[in-house]
Image (spheres, grey):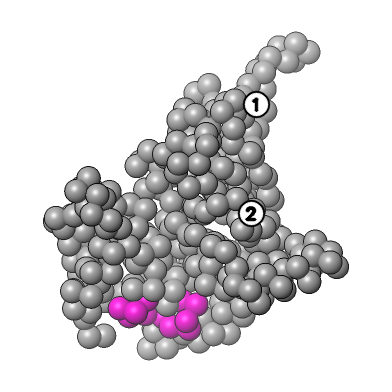
Amino acid sequence: MTIIMTEQIIKEHIMPIAEKIVHEVRKAVIGKNDIVVKTLLAIIAGGHILLDDIPGVGKTTLAVAFSKAMSLDYKRMQFTPDVLPADVTGFTVYNRQTGNFEYRPGAALCSLFLADEINRTSSKTQSALLEAMEEGAVTVDGVTHKLPDPFIVIATQNPIGSVGTQMLPESQLDRFIIRLSMGYPDIESEIAILRSKENTDRAENISPAADADDILLMRNAASEVFADDKIYRYIASIAAATRSHPQVRLGLSPRGTVALSSMAKAAALLRGRGYVIPEDVKFVLTDVAEHRLLLTPKAKAAGASAKDVLNEISARISAPKI
């Protein structure tokens, strides 16, 4: 009975909001429906998004589009080698008139923070985001400052090997609930992009479809989606398989299994269900787990990839009957 009531609420209140957001974002992000949906799933699951791709494929456009569609306070920072941690978290200055030290907010004090080309800055500045992403707060000179709720980080990075890039530490990669790659558009989508550019900036056509309260409503609904113990065992079995796989040096962490569960619940929610099925887990598995796996040098030399390993594990482990 609880599930039926939950699904009624989902179909009458949650899904219309999500559909409006997706509709508005697609005005600016053309031909990437799967990316748009998975980004929204990550936001509903309460996580942060890493966009790993070459320049110029629409990563910044995606972040701007979501900020406008969800009516969120948005800030963007271009991460370069000279960006300091205080630029992200803020700093205190002495006010001669009052005789007190005053806090000046950094770029991260917003609802949606776009960290552009995060792997071009120093490790110290990268780590400045860790507390904000994990705790929803920043600490400056011993004083903790809460961030808005919701607080969402959409970080972009260029492929490793590009000039001036350095790898993110595993501890920071693990704090991104998913990693997505936009990829090149197909020919028809690129024609649509060219056609739209003749008229106006595509992001200017986006109308507000939700607000912070709607985001929190969807998050609360996702947290109440039911997952049977068989689903939890299925997720745990996948995680265990990554940790014992001969080609994997570092498997899926417990934080990764929680992320996989949260994303599966968000996927079930947007599919109109109040309960998780194995297909929800499979739908988000690669995006959640791929960036968390480290392969052995031998596996890399053989041309294996984390995606190949996950596909093999997913095919080998039997999905439960729900």
Residue name at image x 39 percent, y 84 percent? 3
Near mark 2 (Cα within 10 A), the count class, few <14, some 14-19 or many ≥20, is few
Q: Is residue 31 magenta?
A: no
* Residue drawn at the location 26% of the way across and 50% of the way down: 300
Question: Where 84 sits versus 283, above or below?
Answer: above
| Labelled disc at residue 103 | 1
Above or below, 31 relative to 89: below
- Closer to the camera, 27 or 246? 246
Horizontally, residue 239 falls left or right of residue 35, namely left
The residue positioned 42% from the left and 88% from the top of the image is: 4
Mark 1 vs mark 2: in front? 2
Disc 2 target residue: 56
Q: Secondary structure at mark 2?
A: loop
Mark 1 / mark 2, whichever is N-terminal = 2
x and y, in percent, of residue 231 in the image? 26, 74
Residue 84 percent coordinates (x, y)? 57, 26
